[in-house]
Amino acid sequence: MVLAGAVAAGPLPAAAGERLTRDQVWNRFVEELYALHHKRLAAHRVRESLRIGGYARYPEFYEEVQYIDAASGRVLSTIQWERERLEGLWGGLIAWFRGPRPQRDLRHIHSIAVNVYDAAGRLLRDYSATFLPDHRKVPSQTLVFLHDYPAGLHAWRGFDASGNRVYEGCRGELGGAPVDLNLDDDDIANALDGETGLMDTPAYRACFARLPEAAGPYLRPR
């Protein structure tokens, strides 16, 4: 999912005494997300599922690895690793013999997503970050989604790593009627300004009453 813009949520998160730039916050988010990935893998018996992917200008740019809990089949995390770029004649010959190989470390992450489940196996939180293929200074997107499951519904509220509220969604059934809500940052801003009345509807209240309006401690992946 690609989201643009945000509903501003105040100052950037930082430890006491810190003043971090937005780029520092987003890069720290990736580092902590990668640490959470390793923590999650250490607690499970894991199998991997691989595929090669890319873009029109960057074919076969990454190797995508899904890390799957072998017992439940749930996806714990997904990382797209940048594949080794082999330039020139010798690089072409090496690639022809063995193919480009990704280096699996923090510096070679193209995108990373980590899922956290509740005791019933339902998605509780999911985190992700993505870099542009030709720009690794800072991720182009960071997302934190919090999930809730009120009776007959699945609701989720999304933030970026700076704490901006960027997306809300809810699907299911309420009083025998289907519910399908999808709000981007502009929809949320308009609703908060009272322009649509959406947040006063029974469906919206039923979906989001229990979800926090700020990501709070979950801006640090956990």
Image (cartoon, rainbow, N blue to C red):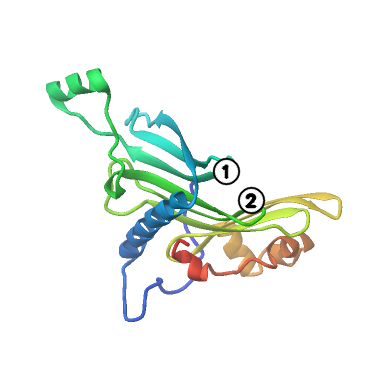
Kindly give the residue lying farthest to the right in the view shown.
176
Image location of residue 48, percent across then percent down = 45, 36
Residue found 20% across the figure and 29% down from its top: 86
Q: Spatial distance from mark 1 to mark 2, Cα to Cα?
A: 8 Å
Is 2 above or below relative to 51?
below
- How many numbered discs, if any? 2
Image location of residue 208, percent across then percent down = 68, 63
Q: Is residue 42 left or right of residue 73?
A: left
Q: Quadrant of residue 183?
A: bottom right
Task: Assess disc 2: are there few (<14), some (14-19) or many (≥20) residues with their C-alpha within 10 Å of its C-alpha.
Answer: few
Whether residue 8 is visible:
no
Q: What's under tag 1, amino acid-wise?
A: Arg
Is 78 above or below relative to 150?
above
- The residue singled out by tag 1 in the image is 74
- The residue singled out by tag 2 in the image is 121
Image location of residue 16, percent across then percent down = 36, 80
Along the line of sight, which residue is nearer the eye, 6 or 178? 178
Image location of residue 31, percent across then percent down = 34, 57
Residue found 52% across the figure and 67% down from its top: 215
Residue found 75% across the figure and 62% down from its top: 206
Residues at badges 1 and 2 in contact (C-beta under 8 Å)?
yes
